[in-house]
Amino acid sequence: MATKSKSASTGQSFGTNLAFVFVNYDLTEGDKKSLKAANPSADQVLGTIVQLVKEGYKVSMSWDNRSDCVQAFLIGSSKECPNHGFILTSRAASAHKALASLLWKHTSVFEGVWHDRVDLSNRDDDY
């Protein structure tokens, strides 16, 4: 699942503070079928997370009361990170599905470059 990101971003800077911008993307039915067929194991998901952390990303999870599901975030936190200043999101019924769909978006949908895809609407990535 792990692929190194290919492009750099400056993020959205306001004064001396960096304002993180959310990047939302709904998995298509085709994405969901492909992800379900790939059926990434917990070890694959965690291995990909470790690789992304080495590249300067942070991964965060929380409960979304509004959608009643787990939400996961891939945060371009390091200045060297290709998606610096941006946060890729995912939501699903379980932590594994939320993380797997988040990583699917990063690696398969965007091929590591998603800083130029900003959409502010609500999403559901359960598969």
Image: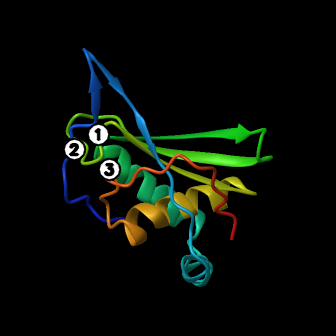
Total label count?
A: 3
Relative depth, front residue between 62 and 22: 22
Left/right of residue 15 with respect to residue 29 in the rendered view? left
Q: Amino acid at mark 3?
A: His
Which quarter shows the N terminus? Answer: bottom left
User: Mark 1: which secondary structure?
Assistant: loop
Please state the horizontal and vertical placement of residue 115, each as a whole percent of the image: 32, 50
In front: label 3 or label 1 = 3
Residue at the image position 32 percent from the left and 67 percent from the top: 111
User: Mark 2: which secondary structure?
Assistant: loop
Residue at the image position 65 percent from the left and 62 percent from the top: 97
Please state the horizontal and vertical placement of residue 23, each as a whole percent of the image: 45, 49
Left/right of residue 78 with respect to residue 71 in the rendered view? left
Residue at the image position 44 percent from the left and 52 percent from the top: 49
Q: Is residue 82 visible?
A: yes
Q: Residues within 10 Å of mark 3 (few under 14, many from 20)?
A: many
Callout 3 touching callout 1 (CB < 8 Å): yes
Mark sitting on residue 9? 2
CA separation in Å, label 1 and label 2: 6 Å
